[in-house]
Image: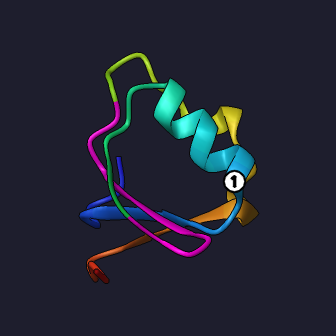
Amino acid sequence: MNNQKFIVTKDKATAEFFIASGIKLVSQIGNTYTFLNQPPKHFSFRETDKGKYCFSNILSM
């Protein structure tokens, strides 16, 4: 797991996948979705396109 606190995406399909997978959405501003980087134990980032999200320690609200 990455040590950054948040996962950020601007891709709606990726955001919906994270939500469906149980990752907690903490902020949505326009088309920017920010999630807590605490995915369920069964979750694998290999199921998503690495170019569609990034990790960050910055929370924009």
The reply to whether the magenta stretch includes residue 38 is yes
Q: Position of residue 36 (x, y in %)?
A: 28, 52
Residue 30 shown left or right of residue 6 in the figure = right
Amino acid type, mark 1: Lys
Residue 56 shown left or right of residue 61 in the figure = right
In the image, residue 33 above or below residue 41: below
Q: Position of residue 32 (x, y in %)?
A: 54, 72
Which region of the structure is painted magenta? 28-39
In the image, residue 46 above or below residue 26: above
The reply to whether the magenta stretch includes residue 37 is yes
Q: Which residue is mark 1?
A: 12
Image-quadrant location for residue 24: top left
Residue under the image location 28 percent in, 83 percent down: 58
How dense is the environment of label 1, judged by Cα within 10 Å: few (below 14), some, or many (20 and up)?
few
Q: Position of residue 4 (x, y in %)?
A: 29, 67
Image-quadrant location for residue 5: bottom left
SS under mark 1: helix
Q: Position of residue 41 (x, y in %)?
A: 32, 21
Residue 18 shown left or right of residue 42 in the figure = right
Residue 56 shown left or right of residue 47 in the figure = left
The quadrant in which the C terminus is found is: bottom left
Mark count: 1
Residue under the image location 32 percent in, 63 percent down: 6
Residue under the image location 31 percent in, 83 percent down: 60
